[in-house]
């Protein structure tokens, strides 16, 4: 399992509209809820799971990236939402840098292996500073998908 | 190396194509009267990478490690069940570590003469090419490798 296995331009939002941490997380969950036709209950379950994980420790990992994630049986399979913000968002990252690139990763409890592999794949993809800058500057969802395909 | 194959190892990762691989392996083992081993590797390297990258906190890593162990048990149990359906004996092995490294070691110690893999997909990006554990296993395996395509025919043949 890697980013390209689950990357879907309908699950990519450029630019994100919110400029605060909770707003961005909610907006990312809205993207998948809209694309997959989630009920209000599913939306709430997913959002609660992501927020609960976030309460353990921020998922801002530095270098302008945040990877909010959670296990939730409200989702059928491992899913990825990518969001790019024009404005840097304070995500309490350890390096103090604000985030502009966001990956929301969701998985049912029964797909732990795929969940871990996808998170590791994202971490590997974003080790390149040039790649991160290109993602930050992506004009739309198609360009984000194209960058991962290169 | 023996022909016909005498010691077949199938790598499972929980994907649909690795399920095709075990079905193919069971049929092949039956045909060749070979010893069959199904292996699942709990990818602790990926967990360590996630902690190092700051994506996982320690408590989360421990929780996911337990989840991965449960995944492994579930898929190995399923492999046993499939083998039982065909009256084929299968040894199930659960390992931990870096997938291609521990697999290489196991293939050597088992003196395997065939490794069966599923889940080899087209390379879609340069980054992916460098990261695929299945690719690495193919490149580092000390014995011949058979790649099973995720083919409905395998499932149909198995269930026939």
Image (tube, coloured by chain):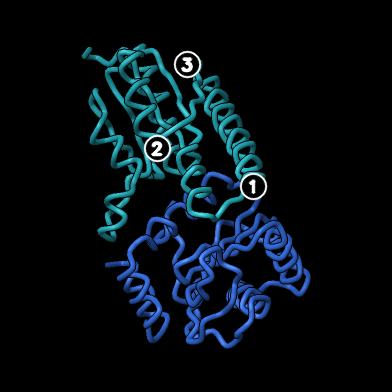
Chain colours: A blue, B cyan
Element carrying mark 1: helix
Task: Name the subunit of mark 2.
Answer: B
Real-space CA distance between mark 2 and mark 3, rounded to the nearest whole angstrom: 17 Å
* Residue named by callout 1: B60
Element carrying mark 3: loop
Q: In this view, does A20 lie to the left or right of B139?
A: right
* Front of the two marks 2 and 1: 1
Farthest residue toward the right?
A41
Disc 3 packing (10 Å; few <14; some 14–19; many ≥20) = some
* Residue named by callout 2: B154
Task: Name the subunit of mark 1.
Answer: B
Q: Quadrant of residue A68?
A: bottom right
- Seen from the viewer's position, the closer of residues B7 and A108 is A108
Q: In this view, does A67 lie to the left or right of B126?
A: right
Are callouts 1 and 3 both on one chain? yes
Task: Name the subunit of mark 3.
Answer: B
Residue depicted at 31% across the width and 55% down the height: B128
Residue depicted at 29% across the width and 22% down the height: B114
From this viewpoint, is residue A69 visible? yes
- Seen from the viewer's position, the closer of residues B49 and A12 is B49
- Seen from the viewer's position, the closer of residues A52 and B90 is A52
* Residue named by callout 3: B88
**Where in the figure is residue B154, as x and y percent of width and height?**
39, 37
Are callouts 2 and 3 both on one chain? yes
From this viewpoint, is residue B160 visible? no
**Where in the figure is residue B89, as x and y percent of width and height?**
48, 14
Residue depicted at 37% across the width and 60% down the height: A127
């Amino acid at each position: 399992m890697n980013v390209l296995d689950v990357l879907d331009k309908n699950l990519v939002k450029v630019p994100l509209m919110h400029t605060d941490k909770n707003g961005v997380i909610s907006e990312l969950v809205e993207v998948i809820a809209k694309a997959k036709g989630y009920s209000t209950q599913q939306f709430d379950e997913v959002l609660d799971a992501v927020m609960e994980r976030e309460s353990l420790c921020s998922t801002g990992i530095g270098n302008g990236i945040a990877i909010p994630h959670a296990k939730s049986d409200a989702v059928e399979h491992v899913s990825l939402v990518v969001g790019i913000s024009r404005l840097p968002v304070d995500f309490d990252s350890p390096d103090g840098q604000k985030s502009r690139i966001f990956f929301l990763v969701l998985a049912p409890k029964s797909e732990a292996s795929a969940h871990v592999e996808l998170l590791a794949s994202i971490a590997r993809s974003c080790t390149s500073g040039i790649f991160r800058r290109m993602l930050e500057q992506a004009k739309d969802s198609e360009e984000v998908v194209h960058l991962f395909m290169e | 190396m023996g022909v016909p194959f005498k010691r077949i190892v199938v790598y499972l990762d929980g994907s649909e194509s690795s399920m095709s691989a075990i079905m193919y392996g069971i049929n092949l083992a039956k045909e060749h009267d070979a010893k069959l081993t199904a292996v699942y590797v709990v990818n602790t390297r990926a967990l360590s990478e996630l902690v190092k990258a700051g994506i996982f906190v320690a408590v989360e890593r421990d929780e996911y490690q337990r989840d991965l162990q449960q995944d492994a048990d579930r898929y190995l149990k399923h492999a046993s069940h499939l083998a039982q359906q065909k009256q084929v004996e299968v040894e199930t092995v659960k390992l931990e570590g870096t997938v291609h490294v521990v697999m290489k070691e196991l293939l050597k110690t088992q003196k395997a003469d065939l490794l069966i893999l599923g889940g080899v997909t087209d390379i879609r990006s340069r980054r992916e090419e460098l990261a695929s554990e299945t690719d690495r296993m193919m490149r580092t395996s000390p014995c011949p490798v058979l790649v099973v395509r995720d083919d409905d025919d395998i499932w149909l043949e198995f269930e026939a």
